Image: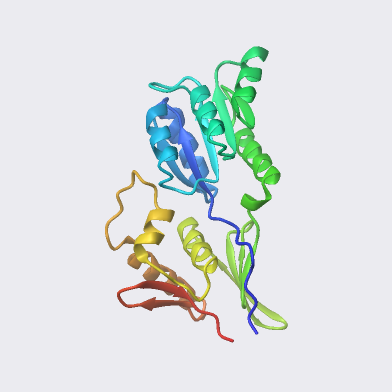
């Protein structure tokens, strides 16, 4: 009998709201390298449009205080007024005690003063994840397959004494995680693309099929049968043998 996880760890999707383009790009690149999917917007009004319409299931928001059109403080206040508990890390050059108090009172969960080092930003994100167990990265096991978050690998149990370890790219890891969160269920390619590619990337229509081919080729190079089944006209399914 195959056991599936009852609560699935999410593929982490972050809304980054930062109007300084050099800083925003640097933050996004670091987050993507850490296996986050990141939507980056340059003003508060666009961020509110994303959040109000619930276009994506975000796990954390990183919001600058001094934004065009709608401030980070107002974004926090609007979210909390709607009883939205999305974890928020606020970035700002305003480092005085009264500013930190105002940001936290507005609903921010943490506060990081500019300039900062990326290592501290990542540490604060990990701290937010520890406070929210439902979004904390963890290993995911379905059948003989285990995704190891810390080492970015797929471990395949071949017998009681043998485990095959396959290194993964960030996108390979994300695709496998998303399908393993929904074992034995058909997931449409459009849904995978929507959830795992940035909204501003405008990926080509066959990007998911191309990624599946690369993933199958990777597993085959390690003499591992690919557990992902293509269901013509419907999508993809992570199959596990009984």
Examine the rendering and report whether any part of residue 79 can be seen.
yes
In the displayed orientation, state which residue is furthest to the right. Answer: 161
Q: Position of residue 216 (x, y in %)?
A: 43, 74
Residue sitting at 37 percent across and 67 percent down?
A: 188
How many discs appear?
0
In the displayed orientation, state which residue is furthest to the left. Answer: 205
Report the coloring of the rendering: rainbow
In the displayed orientation, state which residue is furthest to the front. Answer: 82
> Which sits in the foreground, 68 or 217?
68
- The quadrant of the picture occupied by the N terminus is bottom right
Vertically, is 91 above or below 11?
above
Residue 136 vs residue 29: left or right?
Answer: right
- The quadrant of the picture occupied by the C terminus is bottom right
> Which sits in the foreground, 205 or 156?
205
Residue sitting at 63 percent across and 53 percent down?
A: 137
Residue 194 vs residue 224: left or right?
Answer: left
Residue sitting at 39 percent across and 52 percent down?
A: 197
Examine the rendering and report whether any part of residue 118 can be seen.
no
Q: Which quarter of the picture shows residue 86?
A: top right
Residue 63 vs residue 25: left or right?
Answer: right
Vertically, is 117 above or below 143?
above
Q: Position of residue 163 (x, y in %)?
A: 65, 76
Q: Position of residue 181 (x, y in %)?
A: 54, 65
> Which sits in the foreground, 80 or 140?
80
Q: Which quarter of the picture shows residue 139?
A: bottom right
Vertically, is 116 above or below 10?
above
Q: Position of residue 89 (x, y in %)?
A: 58, 32
């Amino acid at each position: 009998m195959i056991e599936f996880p009852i609560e699935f760890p999410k593929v982490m999707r972050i809304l980054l709201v930062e109007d300084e383009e050099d800083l925003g790009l640097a933050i996004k690149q670091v987050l993507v390298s850490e296996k986050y999917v990141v939507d980056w917007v340059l003003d508060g009004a666009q961020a509110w449009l994303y959040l109000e319409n619930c276009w994506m299931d975000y796990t954390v928001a990183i919001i600058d205080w001094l934004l065009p059109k709608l401030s980070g403080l107002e974004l926090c206040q609007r979210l909390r007024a709607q009883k939205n508990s999305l974890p928020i890390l606020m970035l700002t050059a305003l480092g005085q005690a009264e500013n930190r108090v105002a940001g936290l009172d507005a609903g921010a969960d943490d506060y990081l003063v500019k300039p900062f080092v990326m290592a501290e930003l990542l540490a604060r994100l990990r701290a937010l994840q520890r406070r929210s167990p439902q979004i904390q990265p963890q290993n995911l096991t379905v059948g003989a397959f285990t995704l190891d978050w810390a080492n970015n690998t797929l471990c395949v149990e071949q017998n009681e004494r043998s485990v095959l370890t396959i290194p993964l790219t960030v996108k390979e890891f994300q695709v496998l995680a998303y399908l393993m969160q929904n074992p034995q269920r058909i997931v449409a390619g459009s849904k995978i693309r929507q959830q795992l590619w940035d909204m501003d990337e405008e990926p080509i229509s066959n990007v998911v099929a191309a990624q599946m081919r690369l993933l199958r080729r990777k597993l085959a190079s390690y003499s591992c049968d690919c557990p992902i089944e293509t269901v013509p006209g419907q999508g993809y399914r992570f199959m596990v043998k009984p």
